[in-house]
Amino acid sequence: MRITKRIFSSLVSVVLLSNCVTMISDARNDDVTYDVIADKISDDLVSAMEESSEDIPVTIWLKSIESPQLEMQIKNNIGYDVNEIESNYSAPSNELLNELAKASNGESSKYLRALMDNHLESTESSRRNEKEKTDLYLETKRELLSDYYSSQAESFLDDMDIPDDCVNFISEYTPMIICNISAEKVQSVAENGIVDAVSLHQNLVEELFAFNPADLPSYLNSLGITDIPSNLNLNGTGIKIGIFEAGVVDKNNCQNYGVNPSRVTIIDEQNSNSHYHPTIIAGIAAGSNGVAPSASIYSASTINTWVDSDQYDEVDHRYANLEAMISNGVSVFNFSFGGTVDIDSNPNTHNLYCEVSKYLDYVIEATGVTIVCADGNYSNNYVADVASSFNCISVNGYYIENSGNNQEEILNDFAYKTGNGCIKPDVISPSFDDGTSYSAPFICGIVALLYQYKPTLKAHPEAVKAILLASCHRKCDRVKSDSPPSYTDLSETMEAGLTDRQGAGIPNAYTMISIVAQHSYGFGKLNADNGYCREVHIFQPKYGATKMNVSMAYLHTNVPISQPDTCDDYDIQLDNPQYNVALLSENPTSSTEMIYANLTNNKRYTLRIQKNSGSMTNVKYGYAWSTNNASSFNNPDSFFQNPYMDGVYYIKNAKSGKYLTLNTSTNNAYQNNFTGNSNQLWIVDKSSTLVDNIKSASGNYKSLEIGDLISNSYYYATAKQTSSLIFLITNSNDGTFSLEKQNGMNWLRLGIYNNSTTNGASAAWYNYSDSNMAQRWYFEAVEFKKGDANNDGVLNQSDVTKITTMYSNPQNSYSNLERFLADYNCDGVINSSDASQLQGDI
């Protein structure tokens, strides 16, 4: 008899509502009639019920725990939730961002390492605190998920009288049970209100994607990785990478691939065979010459022999070892294998959204891990089933062909068709002209570096994917076919957005780090409170660039197997006053959207993220952008998209959707439709005090303070000289922030008078309420560039002249924004050093 792990939950019980069901009747074997729950039992399972009188291997999908309830329980346990794990960082120096910009174009200098070392040293305490909070948050979240789903499964199986010896697998982190039951039992299971769906268990016929080792450095350079460990001192320290394949890393021979065996942990070692394939993968992702040479490696086999089913030998449970690695704290996984699901024994049927795809979607959304999957190697064929997960990062491959002094990146003719699956791939990566097995670990290693740099991203796979896509600014021009060998021109361009074979294109590691370093990314949730819509105003001067990549990713769950076209659909729109029409990305079967846009002389862009269709109640999304000129990254005004940092922002009310605006005549703030004028710009400033301070960009040494009484305990929000009262900016639970001010012995929050949604309504301080959306605000980062004192989108001699004039004359005549931009070296003072440093850089 099978021994099934059953852990009783300590989690506060969650009320799950039963779905309304529709009953129909089908004739089956021996003229016995069963009631079938419409839309709950998959078509292939219905066929199996009709054809077999024996127990059937099925996958039962129960209702999942709601994210807000889980976050509430996490906060009860450890005192904070996902929106409160970021720490306060010192902003990077302008010199560091200049050198990062050069490095993204392959022009790094000897100064970069020294500048980065200084920055990492100054932020060491904050980053360590953030990592500790993030790790505890994720550990607590996974423990609660495990307790909840194990207990839910225990109760369900007991209620349905399904014995242990019929149960093959219970997921710790997803609402999935695999078991063998009769057709009659399938019927009663489907009638249970806690069940979302029942499907025929789909066995994945697995194969490894073979390749041969090749020259690594040129491929690292192609992705901007080559010198990151030496230049930035980012090497994956503290990050756990999971290698998941049919075999495990060979600890006896892994040193041949630059992997120290002391950094390798094998899961379920007694039932795993060592294999060269995962060993080489580990070398690319985390070997001494690989992407993240100091990351820890966890390796587990996709074949878990101890849970073989006596009745159904084909039922294997690769999921158990995957979840064991998650329980060990692995945060990013590499899947360099693929497979196909046998559908009615018909090789021409391409059901590419299957059980394993749905399972991975749940795992990624629930636990926060990032899973990178190789697409597959068959020429002109379909993306492998594991890579068809909506929430994974799917990678196709290219190789570098040398011709004299020229190098060309040429796409391999690998799997790219998606059939009825999710639109894939997401990006392309080096494959050494052999297979996409190589492609995945490059991306996996880059994610590990990003986690080391910004630990909170380990809880936001949606933001990681958006940043990855937004870093792409080139695609391959040609594709190589091997049978017979030939080259074909490709029509896939960056302007086309996400394309069939290449997705967003070729990412760049330096660009990804720069996106994070200058806060040109964000994340949040779309739900009924915000109408499943978010508008973000992006202020992006050209600074020598011509194009901008704007990308978005969101997390799917509970997509019906075999019916991915019924998934939720969210699209993006980008507008600018100089566009004739708004630009759109509207992929109906996708978890990503991308727009590659022309930059205009008008610096104001509006990104709209909006639901087109779907039924999910809380949708986690991330967005990011970058330009095609690396010098546009020279922006030390802020470090992360986090209003604890110095920087310039538009501040939008979460209830009304209108923007905090300063009346420059009365100095009182109010809400208004977006104009983008200077009186809607606000500077978050911590330079003079230990507490947060918000200044109007159009003001003169004026910060947002408590003004005169309006009525009924409402006070005007007034721009005036900074007071000694404490001012705090705190995270809410949905991607918004609250502004809090001490008033005597009381605390007040900034909202809108009478919670109004109309233009002209006064911004007001009043008694706070966590449920009041009028007291929540979105912070939208403005991409100003330090040194651009005249704010014309170009750094030149006229800026040097203006800075010289400013420190030579009384500065009170200049606005807060002018002074902010003139402080080129970010030391809080405008003097000759700002002018001389800018002079040297231009």
Image (cartoon, helix red, strand yellow):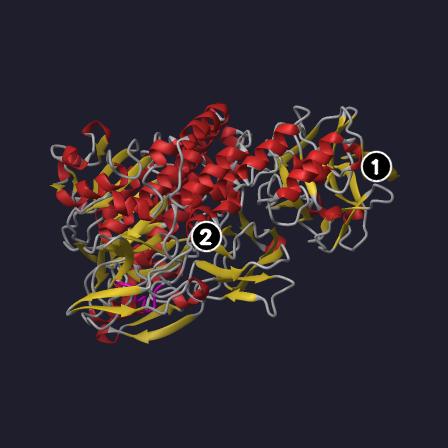
Q: Is residue 338 magenta?
A: no
Residue 375: name its quadrant.
Answer: bottom left
Eye-nearest disc, 2 or 1: 2
Residue at point 25%, 71% (across, down)? 349
Q: Amino acid at mark 2?
A: Ala
User: In what element is the residue under mark 2?
Assistant: helix
Residue at point 52%, 61% (across, down)? 597
Left or right of 319: which side holds 601? right
Residue 352's spot in the image, x, y percent?
A: 30, 64
Decide if residue 463 is in sight here. Answer: yes
**Secondary structure predominantly adopted by residues drawn in magenta:** loop
Which image quarter holds the C terminus?
top right
Residue 245's spot in the image, x, y percent?
A: 21, 46
Residue 481's spot in the image, x, y percent?
A: 21, 66
Left or right of 262: which side holds 352? right
Q: Is residue 744 above or below residue 317?
A: above
Q: Amino acid at mark 1?
A: Ser
The answer to which of 118 and 588 lies nearer the viewer is: 118
Residue 313: name its quadrant.
Answer: bottom left
The answer to which of 520 and 787 lies nearer the viewer is: 787
Stretch in magenta: 415-421
Q: Which mark is residue 713?
A: 1
Q: For the residue carrying disc 2, how many other residues have a C-alpha within 10 Å: few (<14), some (14-19), or many (20+)?
A: many
Residue on which the image places disc 2: 470
Residue at point 45%, 51% (across, down)? 466
The answer to which of 554 and 366 lies nearer the viewer is: 554
